[in-house]
Image (cartoon, helix red, strand yellow):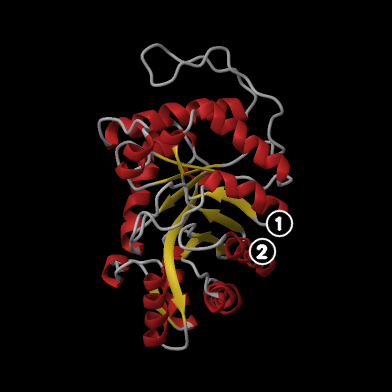
Amino acid sequence: MTDLRLGINLWSQAATWPEVLAAARRVDALGYDSLWTWDHLYAIFGDPYQPIFEGPGMLPAWAMATERVRLGLMVGANTFRNPGLVAKQVATLDHVSGGRAILGLGGAWMEPEHTAHGIPFGTGPGQRLDWLDEAVAAIRALLDGGTVTSPEGGRYAFRELRHAPLPVQEHLPILIGGNGRTKTLRTIARYADMWNGFGTPDEVRELDGVLRAHCASVGRDEREVERTANLWISIRDTEAAARDAWAAWMEHNRTPLEDSLEPSRPLLGPPGAIAARLREYVDAGFSTVIVEVPAPYDVETLERLIGEVKPLVDAGRA
């Protein structure tokens, strides 16, 4: 049976750079599989004008400060940058990190940061997802050593575009985040190596069926797509203590507690209860869990998740 793989997504808001860097080093030292951060220009929880760092600028610094953990954005906003530039950036990160880069991409959703920065936001989610599909097709070709010329009438206008050097990895993985049934999951079926979804175990299991149907329709082996679940977790000896800790983190992030409570997130409690819930995701086919960790980056949760919870989940899969 497949063991649980764990990634950590450090919120890039409400923290100083020394705090962010120290947390990244801790994640690497603890043995997590992957390390992620957001791609936002305004804070997305609470006060949008509180401090937040730009994601692609953080990743090369993390690459130099870590040794083994894979690195990526959860997820890159396709609207922010020309896809050719994105391909060049991630190939560079792959060299800086010694072959540890993952390209995370999504259609983007936060309108105020686009308007404030003068970045085109499109006519709606459908158009942005069309842009994403076109962008990922071009990026995949560039990362694989191809030459790209855009078709007429698309969002982009590439002309005989090609890149060197290619990534260190023979096949640099692309992760796409989102649950959109019609467009997002179809783009994942066509191009992605990893899918990051969210919801209850039953919800993501049902969405997985949609992805499988898209894979069949485009002639893709669905086993080529790694399923990853996006979760929030607070670990303490009791659920009450875990909830208190989560509430303190939300206060630090200037976020009303009720704004952070969703049906599937956060998971609050002792290691045994958290492991039982994670096992449901693994049983649903999501053997990789990526846990978002707000500043001030709780050491107890980071240590107990990989040190206590993961062994319980793996034992349950034996």
Task: Give the mark, 1 or 2, whose residue is nearer the N terminus.
Answer: 2
Q: Residues within 10 Å of mark 2 (few under 14, many from 20)?
A: some
Closest to the observer, 277 or 252: 252
On screen, residue 316 versus residue 68, left or right, reads left
On screen, residue 101 versus residue 74, left or right, reads right
Closest to the observer, 204 or 56: 56
Which corner quadrant holds the N terminus? Answer: bottom right
Mark linked to residue 25: 2
Type of residue at label 1?
Answer: Ala
Q: Quadrant of residue 145?
A: top right
The image shows residue 286 at horizontal and vertical percentages of 46, 58
Which corner quadrant holds the C terminus? Answer: bottom right
Image point (33%, 50%), residue name: 207
Task: Classify mark 1: helix, strand or loop.
Answer: helix
- Please give the residue where the numbered disc 1 appears in the rendered image: 65
The image shows residue 290 at horizontal and vertical percentages of 49, 60
